[in-house]
Structures are given as structure tokens and as C-alpha cells.
Image (cartoon, rainbow, N blue to C red):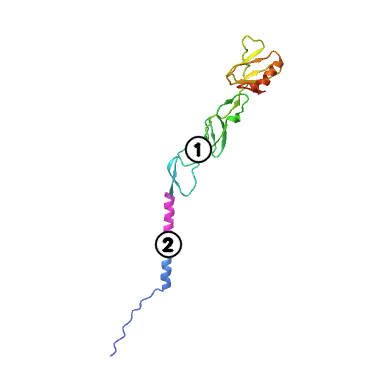
Amino acid sequence: MRKPHARHKHRERIHPVYVVLGVFVVAVLLSGSMTALRHRTAASSPETHFTDSSRSGLQIMPASGGSLPSGCGDNTLNDECPCSLPWGGTTAYNTSVTAYSAPTVPYGSTCASISQTRSCGANSVLSGSYTYGSCSVQNCSSPPPAAPGSTGGYSLSAGYQHGLINLFSYNFCVSNTGSNTYFIPTKTATELQSFYNAIPRLTGVSQYAQ
């Protein structure tokens, strides 16, 4: 008597293509989730980098901007701020101003002779050292004092500067920085002209024609 054949149980096999496809879908989903998580994290706490400034110490700034803060005077790292001027006001970064060592110069001199160019550089540093923002030329002073006991003459004393002589249609300044005192005869135009001509030969005496 024949034994009945035993039924074989068949297992359904998953095709390899479906396995690969499933793995791919899972990988895509995981990648999208991680990207979204990174974006949320970056939005809540932006990436920072450190920069060092000798003027204001260690600073922390957002790395995404890549630029220095625009404000000045707020203890931020910014080396293009304006410079303060000794006489008041400011000048912009990378600009220059003319400064003077004194507010006035004697008659016959020029303000250019005591001028200096001061430039605004990095970290609000102003070059140069002159402290006046303007300059003017002094007017020639009053005539030299009359010589004692003389008639129509003046005494150009030692150390006397910028005296105005205005007689007989002459109008010029003289100064005497030397140690000698000179008499200026003015009885006639000829005498005054002779003194004027002699000035270059007198020690310490100079003239400024007006």
C-alpha cells in the first residue's frame, strides 16, 4: 500500500529588486529627517567663529555674515571707524585733514609753513600731532615806538617784531630779532628810503612789503 505523498510547504520568496528598493526608500527618508534636524538646529543656534582684535579683545560674531558690524564706538570689532579731531568733530576712515601747530603766524609768514596732514587710519588712529584746525596770518602791528629826543624818527629796538612803517607813501613791516637797536630816520622820504635799502644789511632786521 502506497503512502500518500506529503505535501511540501512552499515559502514565498521576496524578489531581490524589492529588497533593494526598500532599502533605498528607508535611506532617503532618514537623510531627509537628518537634513531637517540640522536646519532647525542651525536656526536656533547659529554657527559662530572667533576673531581677535588688539583693540577690543576677543569677539564672537556670526560666521554666516562674514562682515564686521557697522556700528562704531560700541566695543565691537571694527577697524574702519571715524577719527576724533583735537579741535572737535571727526573725520571718516581713510580721509585726511590739514592741521597746524599754532592758530596764527606772524605777518610775512604763511600758514603752510606750520601745516601738517593728518590721516585717519585703522582702529580710529589719527596720524600726526598738530592740534589746530585753522590758521591765520597776523596783521602787522602798530609802528615802532618813537625814538626818545628825536624828531620824525623811530627806534627799532632789539627783539622788536613786526612794526609797521607807513610814512611818505611807504607801507611795510620791519622786525628786529637781533641784539642791536636801530634808528629809523623819517624826516624825508629819502631818509626812509635809505633805511629801507639798508635793512638787508642790518643784523637781525627783516622786512615785509605790503
Q: What amino acid type should be assigned to the residue bearing mark 1?
A: Ser
45, above or below 91, in the image: below
Q: Is residue 59 left or right of residue 197?
A: left
Location of residue 38 in the rendering, given as x and y in whole percent from the top left corner: 42, 55
Counting residues from the start of the chain, the first of labels 1 and 2 encountered is 2
Residue in the image at 42% along x and 62% along y: 29
Quadrant occupied by the C terminus: top right
Pick the residue in front: 10 or 102.
102
Q: What amino acid type should be assigned to the residue bearing mark 2?
A: Leu
- Dividing the picture into quadrants, the one containing residue 142 is top right
Reply yes or no: does residue 182 show up in magenta.
no
Location of residue 8 in the rendering, given as x and y in whole percent from the top left corner: 33, 81
The magenta span reads 26-45
32, above or below 175, in the image: below
Q: Is residue 81 left or right of residue 1?
A: right
Q: Secondary structure at mark 1?
A: helix
Q: Secondary structure at mark 2?
A: helix
Location of residue 110 in the rendering, given as x and y in whole percent from the top left corner: 61, 28
Rendered image: mark on residue 124: 1
Pick the residue in front: 143 or 152.
152
Reading the image, the residue beneath label 2 is 29
69, above or below 191, in the image: below
Query: Farthest left residue?
Result: 1
Reply yes or no: does residue 41 show up in magenta.
yes
Magenta part mainly helix, strand or loop?
helix
Q: Residues within 10 Å of mark 2 (few under 14, many from 20)?
A: few
